Structures are given as structure tokens and as C-alpha cells.
Image (spheres, coloured by chain):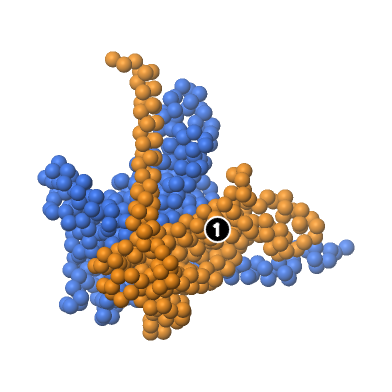
Amino acid sequence: MIPRVVRRRLTSGLMTGVVTALCLLAILPLVFIFGDLIAKGASSIDWAFFVRNPAPAGESGGGVANAIVGTGIVVGLAALIGLPLGIGAGVFLAEYGGGRLGWTVRYVADVLNGTPSIVVGIFAWTFIVKPVGHFSALAGSVALAVLIVPMVARTTEEMVRLVPNSLREAALALGYPRWRTSLTVVVRSALAGIVTGGMVGVARIAGETAPLLFTALGNLNFSMQVTQPMQTLSLQIYVYATGPFDDWHRLAWAAALVLMGLVLTLAIVARRVTRSKYASR
Amino acid sequence: MRPGPGLLGRNRGDAAYRAVLTGFALTLPILMLALVAELVTSAWPSIGRFRWAFLWTSVWDPVAEIYGAAPMIFGTVVSSFLALLLAVPLALGVAIFLTEFAPKWMRQPVAFLVELLAAIPSVVYGLWGIFVLIPFLREQVAPPLRAVLGWTPFFQGAFYGNSMLAGGIILAIMVVPYIAAVSREVLLAVPASQREAALGLGATRWEAVWSAVLPYGRAGVIGACMLGLGRALGETMAVTMLIGNRHDISLSVLQPGYTMAAAIANEFAEATTDLYLSALFEVGLILFVITVIVNGLARLLVWRVARGAAVGSKAL
């Protein structure tokens, strides 16, 4: 029989191996997904892909210019609506969030963060599409804004809380009123972190599809009118991936690679901003 | 002598600043209330018509105007639990490896890689699932599964690709980063003294993890799994593209299924009658209520370990 001490050591060594293997296994899909995106998408990306609109169904060629511009408009508008609200709510949570209202807002933000985005989509549909009578890019932006507000509120709060209290005390001691202290000293110091949170939020909504299905709807033609249906990369990937044509599948991979590149650039740049600011963390 | 108004701690600017910020903060509860009110109002005709039977009827017939959501509720629950079954060991492996065993230089980069999984849009997972995962399952996974376990009710029938299994696997890949990120933060919040005490008493490293660190963070880890469950329940695009979208209750994971989110995504645009639309809103309401309960409980559990911090929000 193996002595007890040896058995315990062996178990420990074995479990270390198991845990390491599980970690590797968790990363494996990432490698495959990125590999496939590049292998199947990169070859279709050329100049025409960026500047041309989709070809009629069944014909080959064409690009996704309409979807790229549409993503920019829908997501940009959502950020314009959602970021100020989210950042304001986050500063409130950090500065005055100690009481009952703070607890409620924090809790609601966390619950909304977990709300299925498709539910937010039908919510935006009843609020905008139904009364107006037609689909619109604006409705899509509102749906995305609803998603970004709670996200940004929580990251902003966290970043503002990181500002050392001594900074605040110094400003107050110099005779600054509280609002000026908060705005020009505390929030200002946390600005890099707040920007990061906002960019991460934008990166997340840029990839959203479900809330746009019944709001922005999608559009095969080039459109920049926010009161009309508009195409986005995510919607285009969905339509092309589930469609019957090989050429569509090819374009879906290419569009996915572009979308992934966009999302990753935002996320990684955002990380860089905080890393240099809070290098010690 | 009385101090001047500026020293009393009241300042008009302060009051205005606070009022504006409060206004911003109030948008969140207001949004939540509006969301609930809107869902209930829109679902009301269907609720009034079908009552509780909506939850366990499996007929979904837009022509006869009879709606029951049982297959979708079943599919949502089964696909999510299948996902957790696969994702929890992986995610806990990641969290334990990164907090307890990995060399220091490795921790940040590996954590970043896992979090990248959370940055991939759902629709890209769906695309990858259709063209890579499903062919792989069809050729490499389904035949041996059926050969070995085909006699159980869970692996019966022909495998065509779009199925509960495909949906569950893609969901598992998608929720791993959430569970891993939150459990990692929970494990990091376990005081070092717990670990040191166990090691000091002669425990091996694994025994320290298993008998000191994990029990201490148990509530938080369970909370992390529930957050993952919440994500899985509401995930739409990837599941819609892979699960097969059939109104059917089948025990076999090789067969197509349906989820609540997928039903809304697929049928909302073609819902021609008011009752059809209302039934879909009721599906949305049920989905919303379930995720709110799951997320609410999860947050309370996580907060118990990591007091009030926005745990998980850093997970990209």
C-alpha cells in the first residue's frame, strides 16, 4: 500500500495537472475561433469589401460598406445617448451611493446587466417602432443605449472609487465646494478609467445582434437615415450565415473578422489606457 | 458668531450637482419599471387567455391561436444546464489555476485570453457553430456518443447537426469567461491567512485549496455559477443559429430544441395577429422574470464574499 503522505502528495500533484488541463481546454475554443476567422475570412477582405454594397441575392461579389457605416451610426448614436446617463449614474453611485437609493440603483444596474438583450429589443420595439409604425436605426440605438447604461454606471463607479480620498480632502481643505471637488478633482482623476469603461461598453454593444432584429432591422441598401431601417455588421453576419448561398457564407466570415477586429481593437485600446494609469494594480 | 452660509455645508452648487446626478441615477430604476410595465401590458391578452396553462402546454399553433410555451421553457432550462455542466468544471479550473497554481508571470496574460472569449459577439459564435462546431460534432462526436450511450434516452435518434447538444456546447464556451472571471475575483478575495493556516498545518497545496480556500469562497463561487446560468438563459443569437428551433420536447440532446430567446428572435417579426405577438411578449416576460431571479440571487451571493464591489464588471 502507498503511504498516506505519498498518496496526499500524489493527489495534490494530480489535481494541479487536472486544473492546468482544464484551463488549457477553456482557452482552446478561442484559438480555434480566431484561427477559423482568419483562415476563412481574411481571403475575402479586399478594397471592394469595404467600399461596395451587397450584390443582389445569389450573385457573387459585393461588399458590406452599408453595414460598416450602419454599425458606426447605430452604435455611435447609442453611445451618445447611453454614455452620459451611465457615467452620471456611476458618479452618483460613487459620490452619494451610500444610502438606500444608492443600494437600489446599484442592484437594479446589476440586474439590468444580466437582462437578456432580446428582451431589451422587444422593449424598444414597443416604445419606438410600434408607435412610429416602422423600423428605424434610432430604435436600435435606443435598445443598445439601454444595454450600455448599467454597464457603464458600474465601471464608472468603480473607477471613481479608486481615487484616493486624500485628493478630495486636499481640494475641500483649499475651500472648493463639494461639486467642484467632485467634478474637477475626483472625476478628472478617474477620467482615464471612465473612458476605458465607456470603450469596453461600446465594444460590447457593437457586437450585439438580438436587440437590433426588430428595431434597426437591417437593410440591403446603403442608408444613413436614422429614421429608416439600417444594416449593421452583426445583422449582416446573421443573415448571411443562415442564408443558402456559398458567397454569403464567405462574406459572413469576412464580416465577422471585421467585426471581431473592431471589437478587439476597442477592448484592447481600452485596457492599455487603464494599464498605464493603474500600472500598480 | 455664526459662520457664513458657505461654511454651513450648504451650497447651491452642491445641491444642483447632487440633483443632476440623482436624476441620471434614477434613469436606471425608471428603465427597469418601464421594462416590467411594458412587458406585462403587452403580455396581458395572452396571460388572460391562457392563464397558467401557458407554462405547461406544448401546443404552439398560430393558425388555431393556441399558444403554450412548455417546449421553449424546457429547452431553455435544459440547454442552460447542459452548458453549466460543461462550463463549471472548466471555469473553476481556470479560476483555481490562475489564483493558486499558475506562476505569477502567467496569470495576467491567461486571464486576458479567457476574458477575450467574452468579447466575441454572440453572432460570431453562431457563425462558427454552424460551419465548424456542427460538422465537427456530426463527424467526430455524435457517432461515438450514439455507439456508447445510444441506449439511454438522452442520446437517441439521428443527429442532423442543429440540436440541443450544439446549443449547449456553444453556450458553455460563451459562459466560461463569466464564471471564471467572477470566481477568480472571489478566490482572490479569500484572505491569504486561510491558505497559510492550512499550509501551516501541513496540508498539501491542493488540500489547502480544497479544504480552506474553496469553502471560504463557496457562496461567491455558487453566485458566479448562477451569473453564468443567467447569461446562458438569455443568450439569443448563437443558440438560435444552432439549436434547431423546433417546438418539441425531446429528452435526447441529439434532437433539435427551442429556447424562449430563440422563439422571440425567430417569430417576433412574423407574428401577424395580436394574440401571437402577446404570446411572444409573455415568453419574454417569463424569460425576464427567470433571469432577474437568477441574477438577483447570484449578486447577493457574490456580494456576501466580495462586499459590494462590482465583481465581474471588469470581465470585459
- Nearer to me, A222 or A83: A222
Q: Quadrant of the C terminus of chain A?
A: top right
Q: Position of residue A235 (x, y in %)?
A: 37, 69
Residue at left offset 30%, top offset 70%: A60
Q: Position of residue B67 (x, y in %)?
A: 22, 71
Residue at left offset 24%, top offset 54%: B134
Q: Quadrant of the N terminus of chain A?
A: top left
Specify the chain shown as blue.
Answer: B
Q: Chain of mark 1?
A: A
**Can see residue A266?**
yes
When asked about the image quadrant of residue A252, the answer is bottom left
Q: Position of residue A68 (x, y in %)?
A: 44, 69
**Which hue is chain A drawn in?**
orange
When asked about the image quadrant of residue A94, the answer is bottom right
Residue labelled with disc 1: A197
- At label 1, which amino acid type do we have? Gly
When asked about the image quadrant of residue B24, the answer is bottom right
**Can see residue B81?**
no
Q: What is the number of callouts on the image?
A: 1
B250 w.r.t. A219: above or below: above
